[in-house]
Image: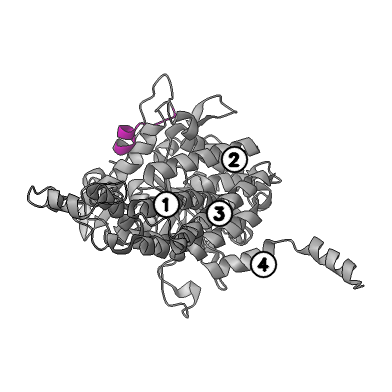
Amino acid sequence: MRHAAEPMPAGIRDYVVSKSLPRRPNDANLRTGPEFRESLRDGRHVVVDGRDVSDVTAEPTLARGIDQLARYFDAQHDPATRDLLTAIEPGTGERISTAWLVPRSIEDLWRYDAMIKCSTALSFGVFGRPPDYGPVKAISFVAWNHLVRKEEPEALDKILHFLRVGQRNNLTSADIIIDVQTDRKQPVAQRAARLRVVEERKDGVLVSGAKAGNSVLAQGNIGTISMPPPQPGMPEECMIWAAVPANAPGMTLLLREGVTNGRESAEDHPIDAHGEEADGLLIFDRVFIPWDYVFSYKNRATAEIYNILGQFAFWKIATRLSYRAEIFAGAAQLIVDALGTDHIPAVRALVSEVIHYAATLRGMMTAAIEQAKPTESGVMLPDHVFVTAGRLHSIEAYPRIMQILRELSGQGLIGRVPQATWDRPDFGPLLDAYLPGHKLDGRNKNRLFNLVWDMTCSPSAMRLALFENINATPAPALREELYRVYDRGPAMAAIRARAGIG
């Protein structure tokens, strides 16, 4: 393996950034929306409904989601949101995306919180992998370098170089983590899809196999490969953490069926009309990764601290869910206001349940920041106990919150009238007369229920509910983690003392 302190090989930067960005005198590290779109026209191999897609920005099933992401980059230049989405990098004095800032203080964590709140508002929280999510693996490696450096002292230099590339090019990154679903009784070493290094070379490694999920990779720039906790019998060549560009030769992304069709009107589908986050099966066929972007390899110790290295990502996930919860609370109130049902005690109780969900989750995320402590490597980390409890609360109550919003809506969801019908001169006035809301005309009431439909009932809402459950980690695993990390010692000692137990 080449030592990271040696000169960087020519062209290594282009490995990750296939298209150099134009540099402006101001905000040189920040892309615009058009620049982001252009960065995706890089020859990546994406298959949609059996078709090879030559330009993801022109593919209807992907383009609207890309437009959604592009608005984030434009917002980095908007005076109203610039200071929420960007920050000054202390080491260089340059303005960068806050997403690529290594947090060294509680104030930095609050900068992250404000950024996540802003990005959640921009997309309504329906992208689990927004542009502000991707750098989490790199930042986690910096945070826990003291656990990695014993076996791989060169890892930190590689990660810091990768962070610099991400900062300078405002990259959007996807997670490449999930092993494909297969026969669990088959020994790990015999599973054909298991991602593994098939050849080690002087300049890097060749990787083959497959990974599932890969959300937003088709609409982003890079992917960060990491592995779940090792299973018994896992070969060491499967233990790899690395970064790959979305257009790496030999890499193919087979996308799932779309859950939005590209023909939705903004009135009928105010969320779905803006597209979706694409997921897919990622196939590696002897994909080359230079040593500079292989952050950890054949290191069982690194593999076994997956949950530790994931702590920063877990916090970002739970924070986004907390701001989605505030949207749910607002939707619940708007529904009962529109129907004039807010005076009914049973209805108010349901709205209060949604408020309780939002307030509890937000409180946990606030406590996570206020109780944050630096790791041994000097990176400020939100309190893991509050984050874990928040993740568990968010997914356990999520199905119930969706059902409450449906119940509050009553027939409003199944009685929605399409825009084209409302626009007819023979029916529009009749619908206005027959379907008024409380202090809201019939058409605007219909628009509200269109949004609630997209939030709770549409195919994309169902996909998102499944994604959130897996993304935040299923509840049984979170309960086990909470059992492991919550400190009961002081309370147990107090009980023993009061009870006179020796």
First in sequence: mark 2 or mark 1? 2
Question: Tag 3: residue type?
Answer: Leu
SS under mark 2: helix
Query: What residue sits 32% from the left and 43% below the top?
Result: 68
SS under mark 3: helix
Give x and y (percent) for residue 41: 28, 41
What range is drawn magenta here? 29-37
Residue 210 is one of the magenta-drawn residues: no
Circle nearer the viewer, 4 or 3: 3
| Residue corresponding to mark 1 | 333
Question: Tag 1: residue type?
Answer: Gln
Instruction: Say the numbered circle drawn on residue 361.
Output: 3
Vertical order, 84 against 429 (above or below): above
| Residue corresponding to mark 2 | 109
Instruction: Say the numbered circle drawn on residue 483.
Output: 4
Q: What is the residue that sits farthest to the left in this orientation?
A: 426
